Image: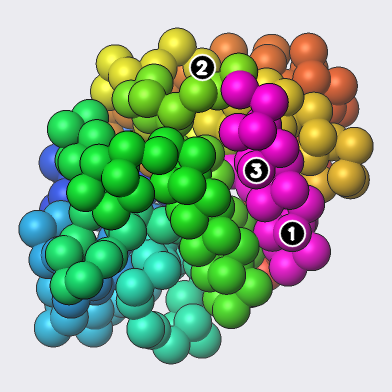
Amino acid sequence: MRFSNLHTHTTFSDGKGTVRENIESAIKKNMLSLGFSDHSFTACDTSYCMKLEDYEKYCAEISSLKEEYKDRIPIFLGLEKDYYSDIDKSCFDYIIASVHYIVHNGVCYPIDHSRKQQEDCTREVFHGNILDMAKCYYDMVVEHVASCKPDVIGHFDVLNKFSIMPENDEKYIEITCEAMKEAFKYCPRFEVNTGGISRGWRKDPYPSFYLLELLRELGGEVVINSDSHHPENLDFFFCESAEILRRAGYKTFSVFNGKSFDKINL
């Protein structure tokens, strides 16, 4: 089975490979296509996002290489738009909407960068109430998707990255399910993100299995993405993710064709 990846980071943000290096890796892996989605600029934290002044260069380089490689592999210009970013969507082929921060009283708390930062946020912002933190995060995801109306919803339950969340708690499950139902109203397409696995934090992709089952019941679509930060990880855990989707009852996954999404049989 051949795959595509829309969630690719390069040296324009916090990735380890250039645009060209990622394209060459995708060709070696016989991938269907490759989309780039570096982190949008966030003024609250500039440590791993794209520089504001680099947007034009980013778009120009990917557009140029898209033409150069057009006979070898389809290339798409995307962006991972953060909740705290303001960008013109029309410049891009597609948008992935993700939430990476909770900002409180002027302090920016990355929620997927380290276990300590997530614990600090829970303690300092939510007085140790982890369910309150979860509710805040998922409310932000819904608000972001409703406002942005993206093509794909990124790492929906990335809050689970460090296994701090009470994933089996009935109230937590209720919060996540209600958020997925709401977000689905504005975008039916959720990515199956393998990034937490390639970094050694998880053994299964986002979203969790019960959420994949819910999304199927809602009639949603899944896009298999690696959230790759290294050219070698473009298709990391994709075959295994396809098997997880089969177990969750899916018959197809969705692949971007440059304008819309095609459904590929699993």
Badge 3 marks a residue whose secondary structure is helix
Residue for point 86% across, 27% down: 251
Q: CA distance from mark 2 to mark 1?
A: 24 Å
Task: Give the vertical position of 173 relative to 237 (above or below).
Answer: below
Which residue was labeled with disc 1? Answer: 182
Viewer can see residue 124: yes
In the rendered structure, which segment of residues is drawn in magenta? 169-191
Front residue of 63 and 139: 139
Percent from the top left, x then y, of residue 186? 73, 68
Which residue was labeled with disc 3? Answer: 175
| Mark number displayed over residue 208 | none
Percent from the top left, x then y, of residue 63? 36, 72
Front residue of 262 and 84: 84
Asked if marks 3 and 1 touch (Cβ < 8 Å), the reply is no
Badge 2 marks a residue whose secondary structure is loop
| Residue type marked 1 | Glu
Horizontal placement of 155 versus 243: left or right?
left
Residue count near mark 3 (Cα–Cα under 10 Å), binned few <14, some 14–19, many ≥20: some
| Residue type marked 2 | Asp
Which residue was labeled with disc 2? Answer: 204
